[in-house]
Structures are given as structure tokens and as C-alpha cells.
Image: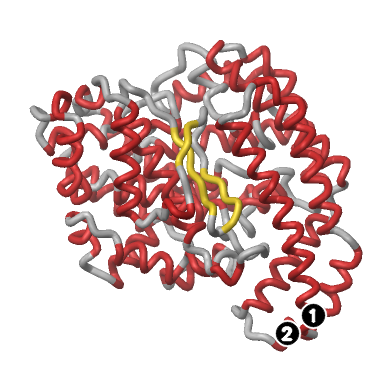
Amino acid sequence: MEPKFEQLQERLAEVTDLQAAAAVLGWDQTTYMPPGGTEARGRQMATLARIAHEKFTDDAVGALLDDLRPYEASQPYESFAASLIRTARHDYERAIKVPPAFLTELYTHAATSYDAWTRARPANDFGAVEPLLEKTLDLSRQYAEFFPHEHIADPLIDDSDYGMKAASVRTLFRDLRDQLVPLVQAITAQPPADDACLRQHYPEDQQRAFGEAVIKRYGYDFDRGRQDKTHHPFMTKFSIGDVRITTRFNEHDLGDGLFSTLHEAGHALYEQGVSRVFEGTPLASGTSSGVHESQSRMWENIVGRSRGFWQHFYTQLQDTFPLQLSDVDLDTFYRAVNKVQRSLIRVDADEVTYNLHVMLRFDFELAMLEGSMRVRDLPDAWHERMESDIGVAPPDNRDGVLQDVHWYSGQIGGVFQGYTIGNILSAQFYEAATKAHPDIPNDIARGEFGALHGWLRENIYQYGRTFTAPEIVERATGSPLSFEPYIRYLRGKFGELYSL
């Protein structure tokens, strides 16, 4: 069987290389590409996606996977061979259900839609993207219909968070919401923290240097990565040796660029930590959207907004920005970066209110896919739901329905639930890590992250997609997904901050 396994690896490596080439084009489109390249870029990315899809869904790949069933069964479940065959078969059986012509249309449309969004948002022009969003919705529904499902969103959710369904996410969100709303109400009933110290003039170059110094301490390897600017920050990977992040800077909001950098570095630490053995295979990436997001939220919030973190880094930040921060004490700054308030923008939302933003988007996605909400009704629905759920309504579409890139660069459905699942898992993983290494909080206060990073590498990162998200969670923490550690974390941290 080993020659057949080698043939499978060779075919998968070709597909992986094509996908990496498409990722390079996507990164370039969102960082340096001139606007005039949009039409051609959409065609180029669609061509690569079509060729990769055709190579992967070739009958010969299916035959190899069938022939390798006995070999897979003879290997330990977590071995490289068994894991690769199992994961490739899962991906293959989904991929053969999607026609290549559909993928060409989807990727071409996504490039056009993204380009339109980059202009529509600053212009507050929802009308410019409304017809494109209508087509995105239609394509998302078409995609879902290629798969058997109980709810039309299930196939989209399954792509990102394998094993989750609309019904299970709804139940999780309902139970979490019951815990969050009273906490939000108790905190926002008090006078808000003073965050004026963050709203001074902070030159971009100094922001960048400070943020990059921090993530280097985290363990982000700049010999295998780099950071660039974009409209909406993201992480992308071309190989285990080339994992890049992007950020954005606001010279009048210190937190915007800094916490975007810490967030994307969390994603990148995961991808840089995947075993090198998996290079060029479907195993060489994070196992799910939720597990991936747990890492960005952990390094951004649980670590990067902790008191211990700032006990170490605040004097360095003051040295970087003496005019702005020399008269601001640590307690004032710590409260500023953890300010809880009813805010308009998801990516800028605090830890306590953030999930309410996600739930709004998830509910709207389900409603659009079900047909109970029309695209043209989104702006008004957004305004009403923000007012009722978060207590503040956007003055325009720029900070309302246009604020997130996701619907304008991909599909509608299957993405947003991962952000809240990630928040939940970030606390569950951190709790398990500190149980194994009780000195981690003290390490953080010394600017040392080796124990935490090492535990995450050992228990999560190295495995890539060897295990599914539920398997990883159970192996790493000893229990299934649970939001109790997350609620304990929020109540502990913000109970102290706000004397609850």
C-alpha cells in the first residue's frame, strides 16, 4: 500500500500548491494590488480554484482513497498515514459534490464583491453592494443545496466548524446569552472607564514597532512570517514556513492596531506550530474556525489585556510614547484597554459585549438563508437589533451592515459562529494550560510566554487537522466544549474591574 500512499501524497501536494498560489494572490489583492487589477485577479483566482478542484476531485484520487482503506485501518488512528487518508477522504467526498463551474463563478464574484466593498464602506453606499450581496446569498444557497442537510446553513457551518449544526449553535448561543446579558447590564449601569489615554496621537511607525516586538516575544517567527497593512486584518498561510499577518493602524486609537496585531499573531502562532511533517497536505492547517479563533482571542484578550501583561509591557509602552502616557498610571491604562461599553463595531467591541455582535450576525445569516429576511431589509434590521441587543444604533451603514468584510468576500453563513466558539474555547484551553502549569500568570507578568506557547504547541498546534475540533478539545482539556470556564473568566476579571 505504501506506493499508493505516496501517489496520494503527490497528488495532494499539487492541490496544496495551487491553493497556496491562490492564497498569495488573495493576500496581494488585500494589501498591495492596484484597483485596476480587480477584474483580472478575480479571473486568476477562479482559474486556480478550478484547476485545484479538478485535480482533487479526479477519479484517480477517489480510487486511491478506496484502495487505501485497508492501509488506513491497519495504522493507529492518530498516525500520519491514517490521519491524512481520513482527512483527505472527508474533503474529497465534500468536494466532488460541488461542480467546478460553480466554484469559478463563486471565486470570480467574491473578488468583484470585495473590491466594491472597499469603496462602498468609506462612501457609506450600501446600494453599491446590495445587488452583489443578493448574488452572494444566491450562491450561498446554491452551495448548501449540494449537500444533504437539516437546515440550509448546516453545510456552510460544517465547512468551518465540523460537526456543528445551526440547531446546536442556536442552543449554545441561547444559553450563553442568558449568562451574558445580565453581566453586560450590570457593568454598563456603572460609569464607563476613562479611555481618553488611548485616543491621543500615536504615530503609526512606533505603533508597528511596539506591536511587532510583543508578538516576537509571544513566539511569532518573523523568519517565517511578516506583517502588512490591509482594510480588514487577517492571517494567511502559504506554507508552514510562510505564515503572514496583516493589521491596520489608527493614529488616534492606540488599541486598534495593537490588538489587531496580537489577534492575528494568535492565528499565526497556531499555523507556525503545525508539525512540519504535514507540509503539503490537508493536515497542515488549523482544525476548525472555532479552535483557530480561540488562539487569536486568547493571545489578544486573555493574555494581551491581562493585568500581568501590562505590568511587564506598560513601562515599555510609556518609553515608546512618553508624551502620551508618562502621566497615565498603570491602573488607568489597564481599565482603558478593558473598557466595557455599548459599541457599534464588532472588531472593536470589548470582551463582554463582543458575542452579542456575533449573535446578531449569525441570526441574520440564518434568516437570509431561510428566506425570512431580504438583503434590502438588512440596514433597518441591523439598526433595530443593535438598539435592542446592545443599546446603541449605528448612525449610518458604514458602521452598520457594511462594517464586516465577510459577506462581501465569500459566502453568507458558516463563519461568524466560529468567533464566539473561539471565545468560549480560549478560556477553556487557558484554564487547562494553567492547571498544567500554574505559574503561567506569573510568567506573563515577567513577559515570558514559553510555558503557555509550549502547552498550546504540544496539545493543539502540532496536530493540525489530525483531530477534529471536538477531539482536540477533549484531549487537551479532558472535557467537551463548555462555556463555564469562559463565564468564570469574564466574571472574575470584570467582577474585579467593576466591583460586581
Residue that label 2 marks: 73
Q: How many numbered marks does the figure carry?
A: 2
Label 1 crowd (10 A; few <14 / some 14-19 / many >=20): some
Residue that label 1 marks: 69
> Which of these two is toward me, 221 or 384?
221
> Which of these two is toward me, 211 or 123?
211
The furthest residue to the front? 223
Locate residue 271, reporting x and y percent.
51, 57
Reply above or below: 107 against 279. Answer: above
Rendered image coloring scheme: secondary structure
Numbered tag placed on residue 143 in the rendering: none
Quadrant of the image containing the N terminus: bottom right
Locate residue 411, reporting x and y percent.
69, 37
Reply above or below: 450 against 41. Answer: below
Q: Residue at x 79, y 52 (%)?
A: 52
Residue type of the residue flagged with mark 1: Arg
Residue 72 shown left or right of residue 346 in the figure: right
Q: Residue at x 78, y 45 (%)?
A: 48
Q: Are marks 2 and 1 in contact (CB under 8 Å)?
A: yes
Residue 291 shown left or right of residue 373 in the figure: left
Locate residue 378, reporting x and y percent.
62, 21
Locate residue 302, reporting x and y percent.
31, 50
Label 2 crowd (10 A; few <14 / some 14-19 / many >=20): few
> Which of these two is toward me, 81 or 371?
81
Residue 354 shown left or right of residue 336 in the figure: right
Q: Is residue 480 visible?
A: no
Q: Residue at x 58, y 32 (%)?
A: 30
